[in-house]
Amino acid sequence: MGVGGAVLVAIAASIGNLLEGWDNATIAGAVFYIKKEFNLQSEPLIEGLIVAMSLIGATVVTPFSGAVADSIGRRPMLIASAVLYFVSGLVMLWAPNVYVLLLARLIDGFGISLVVTLVPLYISETAPTDIRGTLNTLPQFSITGGMFLSYCMVFGMSLLPTPDWRIMLGVLSIPSLIYFALTVFYLPESPRWLVSKGRMAEAKRVLQRLRGREDVSGEVALLVEGLDVGKDTRIEEYIIGPDDKLAGEGLAPDSEKIKLYGAEEGLTWVARPIRGQSALGSAYGLISQHGSMVSQNKSLVDPVVTLFGSVHEKTPEIMGSMWSTLMPNFGSMFSVVDQQQAKADSDGENQREGDEYASYRGGDDIEDSLQSPLISRQATSVEGKEIAAPHGSVMGSVGRSGSMQEGEAVSSMGIGGGWQLAWKWTEREGADGQKEGGFQRIYLHEEGVQGNRGSILSLQGGDVPPGGEFVQAAALVSQPALYSKELLEQSAAAGPVMVHPSKAVSKGPKWADLFEPGAKHALFVGIGIQILQQFAGINGVLNYTPQILEQAGVSVLLSNIGLSSSSASILISTLTTLLMLPSIGIAMRLMDMSGRRFLLLATIPIVIVALLVLVVVNIVDLGTMVHAVLSTVSVIVYFCFFVMGFGPVPNILCAEIFPTTVRGICIAICALSAWIGDIIVTYTLPVMLNAIGLAGVFGIYAIVCILALVFIYMKVPETKGMPLEVITEFFSVGAKKGREARDD
C-alpha cells in the first residue's frame, strides 16, 4: 500500500492523544478517592486544582511549544511529551501528599500541551493530501478511545473494597513507555520541517518511506516551494492539450503558450493562457470587482471562503481523472531527467570552474552545502540564451529531446488532490530595451466543465478547439520560493539560479510571515474557531458529565442496578465515551469525502437541537422518567455529533492553513486560545450551574453554537484535497484581493 507508511506513522503519533484521553478520564474517576484520603470535601479549591493543574501546565508551555518545534523539529518535541507523561505517571504513583500530586499534574500538563499542539501539525505534514483529514481525525478517536479504556479500568477498580487512586493514575507510565519507544525508534522527522532547514536528502528519504515509493521528487519540490508564500500570486486560466492538436487548430503561433513535457521522449503538451469562465477564475474576478460579493447574495461570506469553494464547486467527481487521461506520466518525470543529467554531467558540458554552480542531483552529500543552487548549471538553449534548468524538472531533458519554442518551457508533476506543480521561464523586453527574464511557479488545477468529458465549453474568446482531448486548468502563478535575483545580477552568465534552502533559512524563522495578509487572516480563522469550540461547552460537559446527569435525574435509570453513586457515575461516562467512538469513525470516513466545512455545517445544527432539548426538559415538568430519558439521550447526541465535526475539525484546520515557516508558532497561538477557553469553561461551569441551573448553562452553549455556525459559514473555507502549500497560497491571494476590493 503506497500510503501505508504515513498511516502507521499517524497512528503511532496519535498514541500521545490516547494518553491525553486516558489521563483526563482517570483523574475524573480518581478524584472521588483522592478527596477521601486527603479530606478535601471542605476544600473545593484544592480539589479543583488537582483536576485543573494539567490545564495550567498546558497553558504555560503552549506559547513556547510552537516556536521550539519550528526551531528544533517536531519529533524531539513528541519525544519530550512521552518523557513528561512517563515522569508524571511515576510521580503520581508515589505522591505522598497533595503538593507532590499537584506537581505531577503540572508535569502531566506539559506533556499534554506538546501532544495537543504538535500531533495534528505532525500528521498534516506527513500525510498524503487525499487522506490528510482522515488521518488527522485519529487524534480525536485516540482521545476518546483512551478515555473509554481508562473509564473501564477505573470502573473495575471502583468495585474493589479499597480502590487505590495512585495505581489508577500511575498506570499512565506504562503506555507512555510504549509511546516513548515509538517516538524514538519509529517516528521520522517531518519532511516539511527538514526541507525548511535545508536537509533535502533526509526529507527525500523520509518521504520515500512514508509514500512507499522511490520517486518523491515532485513532493520534495512542492515542499521547497512551500518555504515561501507568493507575494505577487495571481490566478490565470489555461487550455491544456496535445501540442500537435493545438497546432492543428491553428493555436501554435500563440506567443504566450507554455510547453509541458512528459517523462516519455516525444510526449509534449501545451498550455495556452485564456480568459475562461472557470469557477476559480470567476471567483477571483468577482473578488476583484465586488469585494462584498453582493452579486452572489453572499454579502457576508469571506472572499477566502468563496475562493476555496470555487475549487470544490465544479471539480470532477474522480479527482485528477483528466490529468491521468491527458498526462498519464506526469507523476514520474524524474527518471528521464536524472538519466539525461547524469549523461550531461559525464560529458562535462557547460560546467563553470569550481563548484559554485554545481548541479544539485538530490544526493546525500549536498544537504549541508549552502552554495548548491536548486537550479542546476546544466544549461539549455532558448533563443540563443543559456538558462539553467530547475533541479528535478524536465527542462534539462527538453533541450535534448525536443526544441523549445516561444521562449518558454515548463516542467510539471502531480502533488496530490488533482494539483500539478510546474515552473516556466519567461522573457520580456524591459523599458531600456533589454530582455528581462525570470522563473515563475505554477500550481495547476483541472477545472470541471459542463458537458462531455474533456470538452471545453462556455469559454470566452471562441477560439478553443472542441472535442475531448483538452482540459481547462486554473493556475496560481507566482515567483518561486528560492529564486534569487541577487545571484542572477552577480552572475548574469549563469542564467537564473535558486539558492539552496539551507542558505535561505540560515537567517532564522521568517517572523515577517506572521504579518502577511494570508497568515493574519488564517490566524483570525484559527483562533476564532478554537475559542468558539471551547465555549460551546464540550470540555466542561465532559468533565462534569456525572454531575450533570445526576442533576438531570439519571439516577432513576440506575436505581435498580445496585451500584454506588461513584461507580454509577463512572459507568455512565464509560458508556458515553463508547458511543462516541463510532461517531468519530463516521467523521474519519467523511472528512476527506464531504469535507471539513460540510461536517461542521451539518453537525452543529444537531448539537444545537440537542442543547435546546436539554433546556426544555429542565424548564418544563415532563415527569421524572421522561425527564431522565430525554436528558440522557440529548447529552449523548450532543457528544456524538460534537465529536463528528466541532471536536476534530478545529485542530485539523489549524494544522493546514498556516505557512510552513511559522506553522508551529501559529498552531501554538491557536492552541493557547483553546487552553484559555478550556480553563474559563471548566471553572465557570460549576458556578453557572449554581447560579442559573442546567437550563441556563445549556442555553448559553446553544447560543455559542449558533454563533459558531454563523462564523463557520462566513469565515471557514473548505480545505479538503488541497496540498498545504496551495492552501496557504489561497489564503494569501484571497486575503489580499479581499482587502484591495474593500479599499476600492
Image (cartoon, helix red, strand yellow):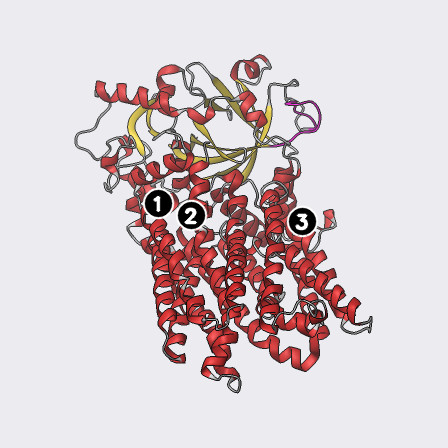
Q: CA distance from mark 3 to mark 1?
A: 51 Å
Q: Report if residue 365 lies within the magenta region.
A: no
> Which sits earlier in the primary sequence, circle 2 or circle 1?
2
In the image shown, does 399 or 37 lie closer to the viewer? 37
The overriding secondary structure of the stretch rendered in magenta is loop
C-beta proximity under 8 Å, tags 3 and 1? no
Which residue sits at x=82%, y=71%?
623
The residue labelled by disc 3 is: 290
Residue named by callout 2: 12
Sequence-first tag of 3 and 2: 2
Against 601, residue 449 (above or below) is above
Q: Could you tell me which residue is drawn at 65 percent across and 37 percent down?
A: 279
Mark 3 in CB contact with mark 2 (< 8 angstroms): no
Q: Nearer the viewer, residue 550 or 561?
A: 561
Q: Is label 2 in a helix, a strand or a loop?
A: helix
Q: Residue at x 59, y 52 (%)?
A: 581
Residue position marked by numbered label 1 in the rendering: 186
Question: Relative to residue 673, is residue 582 depicted above or below?
Answer: above
The reply to whether callout 2 and callout 1 are in contact (CB within 8 Å) is yes
